[in-house]
Amino acid sequence: MSGKNGAIKLVAGNSNPVLAQAIAQYLKTPLAKAVVRRFADMEIFVEIQENVRGADCFVIQSTSFPANDHLMELLIIIDALRRSSARRITAVIPYYGYARQDRKPGPRTPISAKLVANLITRAGADRVMTLDLHAGQIQGFFDIPTDNLYASPVMVRDIKERFKLDNIMVVSPDVGGVVRARGLAKRINAPLAIIDKRRERAGESEVMNVIGDVAGYTCILVDDIVDSGGTLINAADALLGQKAKAVYAYISHGVLSGGAVPRVAKSRLKELVITDSIQPTKEILAAGNIRTLPIAPLIGEAIGRTAAEESVSSLFD
């Protein structure tokens, strides 16, 4: 397809080739020919193998595990396109790594989300597109236009297809996620409950209290990231302890590090639903109670609208 001001070029790194190909198919535009490989010492080399002069280029790359390698790939691809005279470069980052380091939690600690924003900008990106940022203020870390897409329309469609909405309660697994959970609850006209938890150290959480009467409801936990799975599992146990009928979870980004997958598989969660913003591992695909939702149509539509200089925010009205 062609944008309003020239040809569209889609360039993919190695973080999520399946998603990149699905986006290309949605837009009916082949991925640009490019080589993104490693030298013997694991140094990254990029070569764009077709003309991109004057093109509207979109670099599709999640900065998921291994985060540093995929971040460097993104920066080098952007630099290669800039030096090849691309007219505009948009970094499409379905999962923005380092987003959880968005503030100083203590003295002498970094704000790594801001550092990564600076790196992407200085590499030569003209704009950024991402999905469900951990904290909305990260958009302000960029001095270039930034579109933060939301997976909620995809989740709402799936929820409406699979559940009777008259017995659904949306639950935020912590106080910080209330705005996200309330937004989804409003879309399906469901009540809202909140888990009050205390986190003693990173990767561990202790559920303290359930705010709201969940007895008899099918509960849907909503959050942006599932990493170790501890928060979701503890939340599910707390909800079931308060006589919830069943507990499901809808999460935008399935980081699922360490032993998270078998932990979720053995838990009392009926089902964990994640998007494919991070490429699912074989272990995730084989898990009986983990399911992935395709996010390519949403991102593809946003790319098409950006290229055509049309509204992206109207996707979420």
Image (cartoon, rainbow, N blue to C red):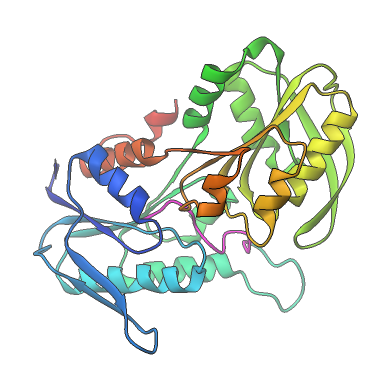
Q: Is residue 276 above or below residue 60?
A: above
Residue 31 lies, in percent from the top left, at 20, 54
Q: Quadrant of the C terminus?
A: top left
Identify the residue at image location x=23%, y=73%: 80
Q: Which picture quadrant has residue 183?
A: top right
Q: How many marks?
A: 0
Q: Is residue 160 above or below residue 291?
A: above
Q: Residue at x 51, y 53 (%)?
A: 282
Can residue 250 be seen from the camera position used here? Answer: no
Q: Which residue is more in the foreground, 116 or 264? A: 264
265 or 66, which lies in front?
265
Please give the name of the residue rendered at 51% of the width and 25% of the height, measured from the top-left corner. 158
Asked whether the viewer can see residue 2, the reply is yes
Left or right, 288 with respect to 304, comes to right
Please tell me whether the stretch drawn in magenta is mainly helix, strand or loop: loop
Q: Quadrant of residue 265?
A: top right
Q: Which portion, as a residue range, is magenta?
A: 92-102
| 122 is within the stretch colored magenta | no
What is the residue that sits farthest to the top in this orientation? Answer: 166
Q: What percent of the width, then of the height, locates residue 130?
A: 43, 50
